[in-house]
Image: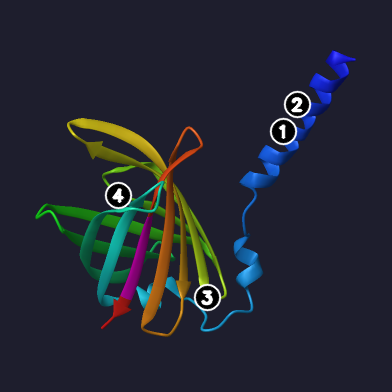
Amino acid sequence: MNAFISKVAAILFCGFFLFACAGPEVSQYANEKPSLDLSEYFSGTIDAYGVFTDRSGAVKKRFTVLIQARWQVIDGKKVGTLDESFDYSDGSKQKRIWTLTEVSPGQYRGRADDVVGEAQGNSAGNALHWAYTLALPVDGTTYHVQFNDWMYLVTPKVMLNKAKMSKFGIELGEVTLSFYKR
């Protein structure tokens, strides 16, 4: 009987774990307006304002980002460069330059120096979902953390971004950003 109970408990745990990991699909936003065209929104100068919160929800860092963005067509594909300059509340600064490629309508790939491998993105309607691994330096050590990143276009000038950070499936914190296109 104990073996039976153990098997049932294991099956229930696995089912709960899989259910807990399920999240929204970008396709559920297909009819939402305004429609997000990444190359249109991320073109020119964009200002962003954000916070990083730990697992408990406490704000650990505040920051601003100045983004200079441009797109061109290379080999028939839209390729964008997002030059991001971060200013943190503790006085530190950071630079990240993304190269984004639209591989097919609504499908994007992205690279940056501190991104491990390639970011994968899908968009539909007003939403974009990114998944990537970031090499994050903390106190002299670099950790590879996973980002589950969602962006939602609210108006033609305002986009909101919520990104969950995790390592080994354990949530470390969350980044919340608001973008404003000049």
Q: Is residue 56 magenta?
A: no
Amino acid carrying label 3: it is Asn
Q: Which amino acid lies under the numbered mark 2 shown in the image of this protein?
A: Ala
**Which one is earlier in the sequence, the residue at label 4 or at label 3?**
4
Q: Image height check: is 139 above or below 98?
A: above
User: What residue span does the magenta drawing correspond to?
Assistant: 175-179
Q: Residue 64, relative to residue 97: is it above or below?
A: below
Circle 4/circle 2 CB separation < 8 Å: no
- Image position, residue 88 (x, y; %): 17, 57
Residue 112 badge: 4
Left-right relation of 139 to 123: left
Q: Which residue is mark 2?
A: 10
What coloring was used for the rendering?
Answer: rainbow
SS state under label 1: helix
Q: Which residue is mark 3?
A: 126
Query: Does label 4 or label 2 sit earlier along the sequence?
Result: 2
